[in-house]
């Protein structure tokens, strides 16, 4: 079922698509006809690989690729695989991300580096390595966060990385416009996934009290917006940030 969006013949890569929002996005793009690459990062007990394979098993002709997006050499190798096996790329969704919340008093250099490496350098690595593969009319969607705009408490690393993603989105949109490639960001608010389930209940309650729609968002509510930005109909939207946050932040 394509929900009015036809992605037949398109090749799509969604980073961090073994679970959460990324898994939702890759399923939606495949549902609309795209041939998809499901990406995960290796862990010692092989759980991430199993989750990625399980996501891919429900999709037609999906390819599963291991890659730590924070490692430029691994990203180059993943793009090479995509070029060899799928011939090019039409849709890149930079979704992979981690959270390491700590106040400035407690944050370590490692917490800072890990989050910047995956959440910001990961997006840069993927965009830079994908450039030779992305075909005219391509779509890049970067997953940012409301934290980039609100400066979430205890999120110095995360908010700075996501603000960097917003800036990188605008630069990339300008530089790729000549090829007819659009580049946008989606900034979710609080979405019910593994990432937010680890937040302390009192922090979640404080956030909930500030959301005009008085609830957290669902994965599907982010997925629909990403799918729209990836659609052929969305050719005149570029360099934008689309907020999906129940009113938590209004620009
Ligand atoms: P999640 O459930 O924790 O999933 C994160 C995904 O990123 C997993 O598939 C994970 O893969 C992948 N990942 C982590 N490190 C990676 C790396 N180095 N290389 C490749 N993949 C990696 O998180 P989520 O809530 O779905 O978040 C998805 C995106 O939305 C993130 O960018 C996040 O910052 C953003 N976001 C989320 C919320 C929210 O409320 N949930 C709000 C705003 C923005 P493995 O399973 O293989 O580890």
Image (cartoon, helix red, strand yellow):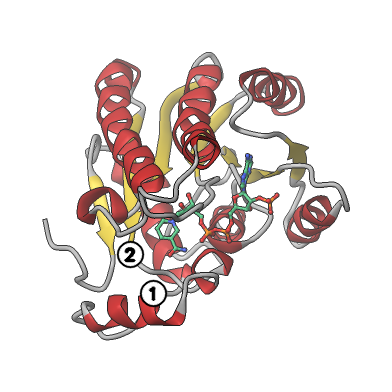
Residue 224 found in image quarter: bottom left
Q: Which residue is drawn at the image coordinates 49% and 18% (left, top)?
A: 128
Q: Is mark 1 on a helix, strand or loop?
A: loop
Q: Which mark is residue 189?
A: 2
Per the model, the C-alpha gap separating discs 1 and 2 is 7 Å
Classed neighbour count for the residue bearing mark 2: other residues with Cα under 10 Å, few (<14), some (14–19), many (≥20): many
Q: Is residue 38 above or below residue 54?
A: above
Q: Position of residue 14 (x, y in %)?
A: 58, 44
Q: Does the residue labelled 2 lie within 8 Å of ligand 1?
A: yes
Q: Dot 2: what SS?
A: loop
Answer whether labels 1 and 2 touch (C-beta < 8 Å).
yes
Position of 65 relative to 81 (above/below): below
Q: How far across and how far down the image is residue 181, in percent?
A: 36, 27
The residue drawn where x is 38% and y is 81% is 202
Residue pointed to by mark 1: 217
Asked whether mark 1 lies closer than 8 Å to ligand 1, one says yes
Q: Is residue 141 left or right of residue 122?
A: left
Q: In which quarter of the image is residue 36?
A: top right
Upstream in sequence: badge 1 or badge 2? 2
Please state, as top left, top right, bottom left or bottom right, where the C terminus lies in the image: bottom left
């Amino acid at each position: 079922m394509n929900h009015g969006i036809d992605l037949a013949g398109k090749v799509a890569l969604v980073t961090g698509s073994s679970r959460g929002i990324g898994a939702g996005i890759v399923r939606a793009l495949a549902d609309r006809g795209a041939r998809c690459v499901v990406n995960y990062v290796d862990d010692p007990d092989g759980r991430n690989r199993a989750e990625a394979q399980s996501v891919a098993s429900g999709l037609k002709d999906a390819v599963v690729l291991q890659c730590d997006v924070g490692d430029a050499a691994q990203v180059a190798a993943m793009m090479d695989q995509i070029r060899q096996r799928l011939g090019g790329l039409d849709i890149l969704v930079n979704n992979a991300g981690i959270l390491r919340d700590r106040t400035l008093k407690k944050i370590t250099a490692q917490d800072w580096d890990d989050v910047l490496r995956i959440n910001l350098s990961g997006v840069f690595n993927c965009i830079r390595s994908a450039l030779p593969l992305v075909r005219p009319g391509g779509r890049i969607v970067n997953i940012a966060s409301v934290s980039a705009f609100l400066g979430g408490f205890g999120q110095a690393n995360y908010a700075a990385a996501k603000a960097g993603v917003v800036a990188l989105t605008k630069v990339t949109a300008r530089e790729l416009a000549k090829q007819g490639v659009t580049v946008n960001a989606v900034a979710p608010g609080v979405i019910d996934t593994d990432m937010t389930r680890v937040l302390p209940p009192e922090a979640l309650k404080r956030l909930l009290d500030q959301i005009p729609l008085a609830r957290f968002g669902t994965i599907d509510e982010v997925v629909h917006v990403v799918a729209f930005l990836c659609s052929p109909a969305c050719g005149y939207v570029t360099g934008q940030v689309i907020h999906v946050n129940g009113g938590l932040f209004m620009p």
